[in-house]
Amino acid sequence: METVEMNSVSLKRPRSEDDVANADEIKRQKILEKSKTGNDSGQSIETVTEQPEDMKNEMISNEESEEQEEEELEDSDEDGDPESFADMMKHGLTESDVGITKFVSSHKGFSGILKERYSDFVVHEIGKDGRVSHLDDFSVPVDDEDPSEETFTVLSDEDKQRLEELQLFKNKEASVAIEVIEDTKEKRTVIHQAVKSLFPGLETKTEDRDGKKYIIAYHAAGKKALANPRKHSWPKSRGSYCHFVLYKENKDTMDAINVLSKFLRVKPNIFSYMGTKDKRAITVQEIAVLRITAQRLAHLNKCLMNFKLGNFSYKNHPLKLGELQGNHFTVVLRNITGTDDQIEQAMHSLREIGFINYYGMQRFGTTAVPTYQIGRAILQNNWNEVMDLILKPRPGAEKGYLVKCREEWAKTKDPASALKKLPVKRCVEGQLLRGLLKYGMKNIISAFGIIPRNNRLMYIHSYQSYVWNNMVSKRIEEYGLRAVPGDLILKGATAVHIEEGDVDNYTIHDVVMPLPGFDVIYPKHKIGEAYKEMLVADNLDINNMRHKIRDYSLSGAYRKIIIRPQNVSWEVVAYDDPKIPLFTTDLDKLEGKPLPVLPTDGKFRALKMEFSLPPSTYATMAIREVLKMDTSIKNQTQLNTTWLR
């Protein structure tokens, strides 16, 4: 799975009178966003999250669905002060708990503020051809087959509501009649086009009723019509997929696609993409959608204000997960304390040596029950333990409704009773409880199977990551930053051991280590034995990683232990106002917004850094290496509350 996540926690910090008056600053005090940043050497790295002043929520329909209400509950903040939050997070994980213990550089760490604004963290996708995705063109490809602009305005909101209900089989009516007020052939043609293009799966015909003309919309091919956009309405000369660049703020990729699909009235599965991008950032990536015109997509720019669509083109293929080369990051660390020499040493080391390719803290969850423990229980075939770990009460920061649900479960062990305490049913806890209600307490395997496959596999992948992190730390402690006999390197897709006579032909940047599984080999030195010992301690057999349930059989994989970022650049800039942006985004450039003039000798200093990473690597781990910080939420919050006293 590609990972570029960099979530952050909102923490209080000293504020001016102007700050107190600012509504965004008040939001900054809300505590519940999940953090991944901290410090390990006595310096504090403060992480604060601010809604950009120009951020606007996407337009929503008048009737909020249950799904939208759940999203609001999931996204809602809970108030608290830093001391109480830090106290709750005493039960959270630190980096050492998941095997993250080593650094490769020798410079002294320094502090800074990460993600003070969303625009301080920008991700641009790098396609398989090496091209970096940018939003720099709103124009729509000219196509004589496209409907007129009137298509998008000819239907009333009431007509659209009725047509959507018909399209989604939400009412018992077999058709919807739309009266043609100004009866001309041209007007009827526009209405026909509007219905067919805005509501895939519906056909239209004209009927006379009581001397008036009506356009009748009806289903042409049953329920399959919605899933399969109309083939005959798409020009043969045009590629079946419209590719576009999606620029988004404060939305993850799937949330963005769900919003787009609602506005387009299509199913989300007609969209494809190469990788998922973080919510707490500005991200730019390529998306493809089946048989939706660029004109319709561009029309959404008028109503969706926290994302923009552009750079449209038609192609004959969708996008596939993993097809990308990686991501290019632009990161601003504000209010840095490092000297010029420290910063130069840190950034030169990042460019020349790189960083340990650890799986970041977000891989392991943010509650007192790490995801790797659930993964281990699955691999042990201990299903009562799986159920207990997911549902049991736990100390620490959680949403109130989850706390009540867990308490009810502990008290009654009744899925129905616990579910009543849970307004959000789409969470893992809700899905498991529904499974237990359906299959009974004696069939936990089937109940657990209700959880979407990717979520279930996340647990065992977390365990693999936990093992890998620990083994890599041992490898670097034992042998340092050089290739040694018995290490593994890849020749094509095949792993081979480094022999004594070949060791000088390889560097640490060639060395890989395995994630445990039935289809990998292990190093031929002390670390190979350490893998076996770690799994034995967890009641697992390294020579038998096949599970009786095929989904949970681990084949394993190989992962480079050191990543050297590409296209590394940096500069230190001075500034006075923490609210002003320190670089322009793609959208700023399109809208002609100039970069604010920065003082030459400001009150604060910021480190602006850029670098490119391959897929499945964590930007948090690169920043950890620069700042020498512990990126755990536990360490972060405790350091910050100490600093605030």
Image (spheres, helix red, strand yellow):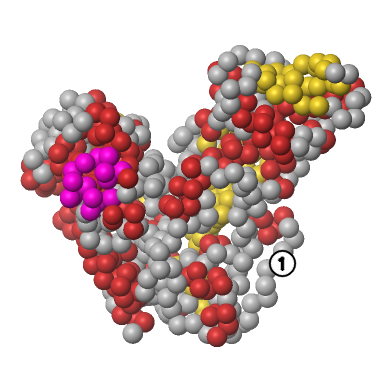
Instruction: Give, as a three-letter code, the residue at label 1.
Output: Pro
Residue in the image at 8% along x and 40% along y? 539
Residue in the image at 92% along x and 24% along y? 184
583 to 255, vertically: above or below: below
Question: Looking at the rendering, which quadrant does residue 592 occupy?
Answer: bottom right
Residue 22 locus on image (x, y percent): 57, 76
Residue 72 locus on image (x, y percent): 48, 52
Left or right? Give the position of 325 relative to 445.
right
User: Residue 609 or 185: which is nearer the viewer?
Assistant: 185
Left or right? Give the position of 328 relative to 305.
left
User: Residue 309 or 388: which is nearer the viewer?
Assistant: 388
Rendered-image quadrant of the N terminus: top left
Tell me which secondary structure the magenta stretch mostly adopts: helix
Q: Please tell me whether residue 443 belongs to the stretch shown in magenta.
A: no
Q: Please tell me whether residue 413 belongs to the stretch shown in magenta.
A: yes
Residue in the image at 35% along x and 74% along y? 82
- The answer to whether residue 623 is seen in the rendering is no
Residue 587 locus on image (x, y percent): 67, 55
640 to 220, vertically: above or below: below
380 to 391, vertically: above or below: above
Question: Looking at the rendering, which quadrant does residue 495 occupy?
Answer: top left
Residue 93 locus on image (x, y percent): 24, 60
- The answer to whether residue 420 is seen in the rendering is yes
Residue in the image at 60% along x and 55% along y? 57
User: Residue 590 or 83: which is nearer the viewer?
Assistant: 83
Question: Looking at the rendering, which quadrant does residue 355 occupy?
Answer: bottom left
**Which residue in the rendered view is the most extreme toward the front?**
210
Query: In the rendered structure, which segment of residues is drawn in magenta?
Result: 405-419
Q: Residues within 10 Å of mark 1 (few under 14, many from 20)?
A: few
* Helix, strand or loop under label 1: loop
Residue position for label 1: 594
User: Residue 139 or 368: which is nearer the viewer?
Assistant: 368
